[in-house]
Amino acid sequence: MELSGAEIVIQCLKDEGVEYIFGYPGGAVLHIYDALFRQEDVKHILVRHEQGATHAADGYARSTGKPGVVLVTSGPGATNAVTGIATAYMDSIPMVVLSGQVPLPVIGSDAFQECDTVGITRPCVKHNFLVKDVHKIAETIKKAFYIATTGRPGPVVVDIPKDITDPRVKIPYEYPRSVSLRSYHPSTKGHRWQIKKAVELLLSAKRPMVYSGGGVVLGNASDELTRLVDLLGFPITNTLMGLGAYPATGQHFVGMLGMHGTYEANMAMHDCDMLLAIGARFDDRVTGKIAEFCPYAKIVHIDVDPASISKTVRVDVPIVGEVASVLTDLCDMIQSGERRPDREALATWWDRISHWQKVDCLRFDRSGTVIKPQFVVEQLYEATHGDAFITSDVGQHQMWAAQFYKFDKPRRWINSGGLGTMGFGLPAAIGVKLAHPDSEVCCITGEASIQMCIQELATALQYRTPIKIVNLNNGYMGMVRQWQEFSYESRYSHSYLETIPDFVKLAEAYGHVGMRIEKAADVRPALEEALKLKDRTVFMDFLTDPTENVYPMIEAGKAHNDMRLSPGMIDARELA
Amino acid sequence: MRHIISILIENEAGALSRVSGLFSARGYNIESLTVAPTQDPSLSRMTLVTSGSDEIIEQITKQLNKLIDVVKLIDLSESSHIERELMMVKVRAVNGAREEIKRLADIFRGKIIDVTPGTFVIEITGEKSKVDAFLSALAEDSIIEVVRTGASGISRGDRGLTL
Ligand SMILES: Cc1cc2nc3c(=O)[nH]c(=O)nc-3n(C[C@H](O)[C@H](O)[C@H](O)COP(=O)(O)OP(=O)(O)OC[C@H]3O[C@@H](n4cnc5c(N)ncnc54)[C@H](O)[C@@H]3O)c2cc1C
Ligand SMILES: Cc1ncc(C[n+]2csc(CCOP(=O)(O)OP(=O)(O)O)c2C)c(N)n1
Ligand SMILES: [Mg+2]
């Protein structure tokens, strides 16, 4: 088969099994767009801003486990994509971004729409390439997919100068069947000796704790995790990125941990004598004050990336490998041995945890007519039978979504944790809906965040991706306002948006359904009504209590046992 | 502590900036960095001198290993090794000072590789400490310019950093 460079790009995507590509055209990629036009296998989703393309591809990737694919032009196309690439990088999401570049002979001459895409994206990609020869396109794209999806996943950028996609230059094409790189060998199986040491620690623990993260979701190891936790009977907490990997309604789940984690999860972290960390990276939002992190615990850490291990907290037993494989080995080794966990010690430990649980740290006021944001999420959970895909933006609403939507399955909770990118939720929801057309997809957002990629409402109409937008409109950048209330004596410096658009009209202008909900009693009926509109995107603008804060909260630099609870809540420490 | 790390890296455009970018992005310090292709032209060998606590050095080696272009690396400081640096120094050399400088160069096994009526260029190789010592032995106001390669290193014994 003889193909031009542009045709090779598209043929590679077909051979890679790519279903959707999210993009925006421009001069440097016109040859590629022309090749795209002349085929039907790879479906192109035209977004309204390149940031939207990356987030939509990201949502597709997070909800399926398959890599998200993006196509942007050189210069501003590429720079607009950077936020989405960095977002994917921080959360280890597999993504391949194809960017156009000015022709090879003019690279470096400040040509029209030239920017050093490889240089600009270098710090926020797993790897990137500048292809300099039409004969290298197929091999490079193959490598890009391989690198993006193996080991610790991440985004890979392939920068393609326009001249090598010239339709007049045809060369023989063959997609490489496999690829091997002498400099890249991600680990898979954990070291047996290390696993044995871990088993010993697990079985001698009196106050064990499992702390699992996004790595379990990324590594498709939910079943293995559930098997281990149920086998041992240990309490488990999830990071924001790990929600759903162990069912939130499962009997051993104690809620999320960290800055806005539950009282019981954080107290158990502080008091445990053995911590099993699985596919989690000891982020500062999770550890709080490092010097007082799990002061009594021996720590075992399973991670595919050696650089994640002992990065911020030193661990006693590192295990480098894929979670699924290591957890299987762990379970098998425990089951084939004689020894069992210390049931008596565990019962005492669970007893203590249940005291902490009695604090009921997520309780909120249900008495008034004003809409409490927590109530909306709780009602959404019930109305969707806990089975929706939920995307979110960044802020208080994100935390309430994490706390109140009980995810029982992995890949249902789609949010930007590491970079915390406002504007992520709407385009991500479009990507999720394309991948799961028969599932309910909701975007829990805030009036500030939604405006950062609002233009993607047009994309949602063009591709008929009916999503339900749940806007928790508190009139403030609530998360910023909360920090200002706590740490800056309520000086609300520029966290109030004076001119919020009429979202109902805005939704209608984009061809969708808009709803405004102002009273608590109307929340559930509104949700039910919106969910009935199966083939429409509905923008529900809930006017919520502007003064509500997210609790519990571990303020920056504080330890796990130093949480700020909702005012009026029985003093937790007395109970505990 | 000071560490000297040897790296085999793909000889590709941009590979060097991936390494230097990693150091600036993560706030690690680089004392020196040398790089040149090996006998296999597809590979470059880099010697990097850095310093930090054991934890930081562990992160540095892990992060370097994580770069896709890095094929292999070793921390030479962990075992017995040889370190060499090359320096060329241009000094003012007039009248009686010419003999004096020549003697000094001999003591340090330096070579005079360029001569003019008023200057010498002296080449010195050795460990950092020797090169430093030669510099401080020269009268400060005689030095016109100094160029140093930074250290390159190799391990002793029969082990080697190869594919
Ligand atoms: C406003 C806001 C508030 C936040 N508050 C909290 C909070 O209260 N609590 C909280 O937990 N987070 C919170 N976060 C998120 C936080 O910033 C981090 O993103 C999150 O804690 C990181 O989750 P993780 O440790 O699971 O790591 P991830 O970023 O999900 O990283 C996954 C880890 O697993 C490893 N891995 C990947 N694949 C595999 C595999 N196949 N096998 C083995 N290992 C693998 C990776 O190497 C990596 O180390 C907040 C974010 C925002 C924006
Ligand atoms: C692109 C970007 N800019 C700034 C921030 C900092 N930030 C974090 S939360 C937040 C406020 C979000 O407000 P809103 O979307 O209304 O959510 P709320 O907290 O009110 O629920 C801001 C500005 C960010 N995370 N992302
Ligand atoms: Mg808000």
Image (tube, coloured by chain):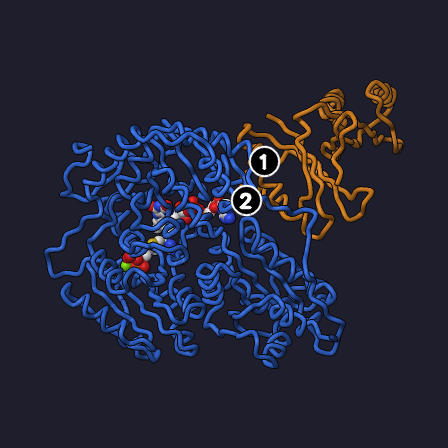
Q: Nearer the viewer, residue A303 or A27?
A: A303
Instruction: Please name the residue that numbered disc 2 is placed on.
Output: B25
Residue occupying image coordinates x 74% and y 75%: A2
The colour assigned to chain A within the rendered structure: blue
Q: Nearer the viewer, residue A60 or B92?
A: A60
Quadrant field for ligand 3: bottom left
- Above or below A493: residue A230: above
Q: Can the viewer see residue A248?
A: yes
Q: Quadrant of residue A78?
A: bottom right
Left or right side of A260 for B58? right
Disc 1 marks which amino acid? Asn
Q: Can the viewer see residue B17?
A: no
Disc 2 marks which amino acid? Ala
Q: Kindly state the secondary structure of the residue where label 2 is placed.
A: helix
The colour assigned to chain B within the rendered structure: orange
- Above or below A333: residue A535: below
Residue occupying image coordinates x 87% and y 27%: B111
Q: Where is residue A511 shown, x and y percent of the image?
A: 34, 80
Q: Quadrant of residue A487?
A: top left
Q: Where is residue A228 shown, x and y percent of the image?
A: 41, 42
Instruction: Please name the residue that numbered disc 1 is placed on.
Output: B29
Residue occupying image coordinates x 44% and y 42%: A278
CB at disc 1 and ligand 1 closer than 8 Å:
no
Circle 1 packing at 10 Å, graded few (<14), some (14-19), many (20+), is few
